Amino acid sequence: MPLRFLTAGESHGPELNIILEGIPANMPLLAEDINADLRRRQGGYGRGGRMKIEKDQVIFTAGVRHGRTFGGAPIGLKLINKDHQKWLNVMSAAPVDQKDPEVKAQLDEKYISKVRPGHADFAGALKYDAPDVRDILERSSARETTSRVAAGAVCKKFLSEFGIEIFSHVLRIGEIEVDSSVIASASVAWREAIQCKDAFAKFKDQVESSELRIYNPSGELEQKFKDYIDETRNQGDTLGGLVEVFALGVPIGLGTHVQWDRRIDGLIAQAMMSTHTVKSVEIGIGDEVAELPGSKVHDQIYRADDKSPLAYERHTNNLGGTEGGMTNGMPITCKVGVKPIPTLISKLDSIDLDTKSNAESHFERSDICVVPAAGVVLEAMMAIVLASAVLEKFGGDSIEETKRNYKAYLESLKQR
């Protein structure tokens, strides 16, 4: 069956809940497999005060027994919002006594009528006829990405059973980009990983040791980026950036050309665009395909030597690992543009829905730059799409059956 997941929960509600259905039985799964990525999401230079409050730790509520998935059961996961203790009346599920002066004061303090440009506030308040814009803010908040990371971490664990690994790194923040020589080095580093796991491990270690999640062996760029973020914070502004997400070890044939909504590149792009703050997605060299002739774009195919797992190879990956809506055996590469978050200390011009007059936008505690953390969320979304595609093509009721199907398919490819 195809993989599917649902999330529930609000930014300041009691908890976040996730149901993930479709993971086969008998897959090893521990809380730490998920908590590691939850920690990565909370890191990164430029994060706000909320990250100091929440120390996200997953709680399994269903589908995992003795460190493994079992019986095809949906996996239930829960994350506690520690900050909820300060919002008990404001986010109470039951009616509260608004005649109580203390309760009324708390509700008034958190009431919102001034919308933030760039956020879901305005369209959501009108669409859902919300009497308080907080009705929209709470669910549309990027706190929901914590749930995606949890679901994605389970999918990463599943994909690791097939030698598929997903990672990301930051290419630019605001006006400052990792210079072209470093980007070239990064590209070489992870492309070498197709044949050399040690090269990829070194690349990952370098990125993970950076608070900006940049590949910067010399260390010269780290402080430059931090100073830029600090300067932006002092100006009351926010920053976006560009993240590269990629997947290694992906087999030929995930996705299909036969229907528009089953094409793997379309599914990846939709998953990326569904993520908070994302406004652009490029697969492979992206918009450069509009500038270059076909001879410089299409990844030519050659007979491979005997050491290659397949009889064919390519020397370029301009199309980012997909052709005709299917994976082609090359790494999947995706560049994602993340906009500056819309909650600014220096408030934007907006409107007040109550008074129907011009006003300054609402300010809710927020980050200055989420680009490093966004990469972790985007990894999760890539993992969810690829895990679903692997299950669609090779899926069995148990991890053992699925791996048998996968191995048989790879053996058949060697004969072509």
Image (tube, grey):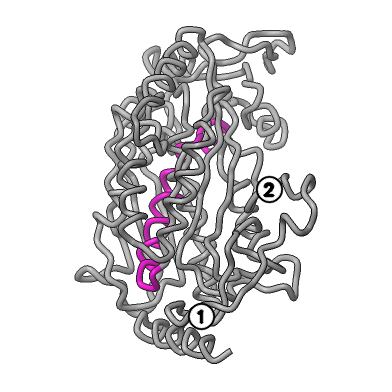
Tell me, yes or no, if residue 9 can be seen here. Answer: no
Q: Is residue 146 magenta?
A: yes
Label 1 or label 2, whichever lies nearer to me, is: 1
Judged from the image, the secondary structure of the residue bearing numbered disc 2 is helix
311 or 171: which is nearer to us? Answer: 311
What amino acid is labelled 1 in the image?
Answer: Leu
Q: Which mark is residue 286?
A: 2
Q: Which mark is residue 310?
A: 1
Percent of width and height locating residue 409:
50, 86
365 or 138: which is nearer to us? Answer: 365
Percent of width and height locating residue 17:
40, 51
Residue 181 appears left or right of 82: right
Judged from the image, the secondary structure of the residue bearing numbered disc 1 is loop
Q: Quadrant of residue 372?
A: top left
Tell me, yes or no, if residue 230 can be seen here. Answer: yes
What amino acid is labelled 2 in the image?
Answer: Gly
The residue at 38%/52% (across/down) is 150
Furthest toward the left, the residue is: 66
- 334 vs 19: above or below: above
Q: Is residue 361 magenta?
A: no
Q: Quadrant of residue 113?
A: top right
Q: Which residues are magenta?
A: 135-163
Distance from label 1 to label 2 (Cα)?
Answer: 27 Å
User: Which of the marked residues, 1 or 2, is nearer the chain's N terminus?
Assistant: 2
Percent of width and height locating residue 271:
59, 53
- 271 vs 127: above or below: below
